[in-house]
Amino acid sequence: MIKIGTALFEATEELEREKGISKEVIIESLKDALVAAYKKHIKAKDAPNVEAILDEVSGEIGVFRTKLVVENVEDDNLEISLKDAKEIDDDVELEDEVKIEVTPENFGRIAAQAAKQVITQRIREAERKMVLDEFMEKKGTLTTGIIQRVENRNVFVNIGKTDAILPFREQIPGEYYKPGNRIRVFVLNVKETNRLPQVIVSHAHAEIVRELFELEVPEIEDGIVEIKSIAREAGYRTKLAVHSNDPEIDSVGACIGPRGSRIQTIVGELKNEKIDIVRWSEDPVEYIVNALSPARIISVDILADDENAHEALVIVPDDQLSLAIGREGQNVRLAHKLTGWKIDIKNESQAEAAYQSQYEEAPQDDEYIDEQADFDEEEPIHEEEYGIDAEDMVEEVSDEEADSQDEE
């Protein structure tokens, strides 16, 4: 047996405290290293009946062979005679197994070298696996880190036991990343490598907005208010569709908070990024109208609504076209991402011109003219011809009010 004392156990306890690697992993690594060194010493690639045994009380470790007790020995490496086995253990019988120490003399230095290499490798593997498991659990969640450095437009963020990479494409345009500053990031992906796992994070992901609202709005955390969809262009604008599962609670008001306290906190966290909170609806017309806010909508005409296509034509007043489209198309682009509908926006003049052009191209035979004349007499063409009237929906004019106006 090789005397190793208590230093090993003290070292394993320190590693467990500092790196989180369990004591058992280190001890098993030492045993494996000792067996590997013994096999190399006896020039044997395979020795299945060889193992290392550590006595934690005495602080000694040695190499042992397990042999089968037989009457006639045929293979000295695997078998032992009953007479020789009795010298080790008086109670042994035929067909029993005994462990015989085979630790070579002056084996301590060789074992120490092999143990150092194997233990170092095992510590690295254990540390890599531990970090991989930890960040696999964090994948798809928000975490806080400290900016370490900026290299080749990539930002390296320390998020605990490793440095994560914030690629240029996941950064907020115009944002200055100063080393030493704390930053909230979203864990996008974790890639296993030969060294420590590579963690990819994002500062521009839409889920960051979701996490911030869940932290600031208790109704969302409790499940009363639900975030249905998020569309974000980081650094510029975000649209958030929310729905209340309790009719007595206003989903938009809950997200804004008393005097705008909740939304102001989130906007400050996002460096004054604009946030539009809209009400989600099962009705696609209402949902599209809400998504295009703050623009005022006249009508929404559903052109296609099936598994392959969702298309709608939206008519707005002439003075609302630029507001509905937004700067460089941002408002309609975010509305498309939020709702999943392809939205074509036209003002009243464009819609009227398109209708007139379509009418002029239609066949002008007598039968058609008579039918059109009859149609005009019985049912005049209104603005609703271009689509579902959404203006009344926005202003929430009830049917009763409409009937009372007709009677007057």
Image (spheres, grey):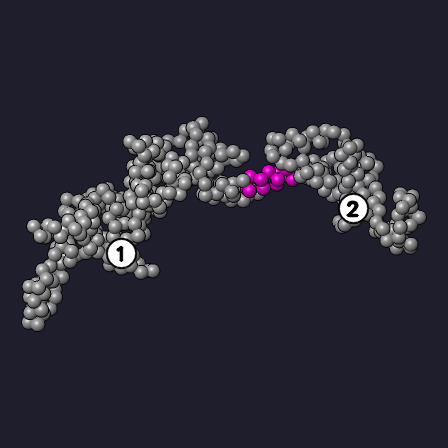
Mark 1 surroundings within 10 Å by alpha-carbon count, few (fewer than 14), some (14 through 19), many (20 or more):
some
Q: Which residue is mark 1?
A: 311
Kind of residue at badge 1: Glu
Q: Is residue 117 visible?
A: no
Residue shown at 16% from the left, 51% from the top: 400
Magenta region: 122-133
Residue shown at 91% from the left, 50% from the top: 82
Residue shown at 41% from the left, 29% from the top: 178
Asked if residue 70 is among those painted magenta in the image, a careful observer would answer no
Which corner quadrant holds the N terminus?
Answer: top right
Q: Earlier in the sequence, mark 1 or mark 2?
A: 2
Towards the viewer: 31 or 167: 31
Location of residue 296 in the rendering, given as x and y in whole percent from the top left corner = 19, 45
Q: Which residue is mark 2?
A: 50
Location of residue 49 in the rendering, given as x and y in whole percent from the top left corner = 79, 49
Please indicate whether residue 97 sits to the left or right of residue 286 in the image. Answer: right
From this viewpoint, which residue is outermost toward the right?
83
From this viewpoint, which residue is outermost toward the top?
180
Asked if residue 123 is among those painted magenta in the image, a careful observer would answer yes
Q: Main secondary structure of the magenta part?
A: helix
Relative to 59, say whether 41 is above or below.
below
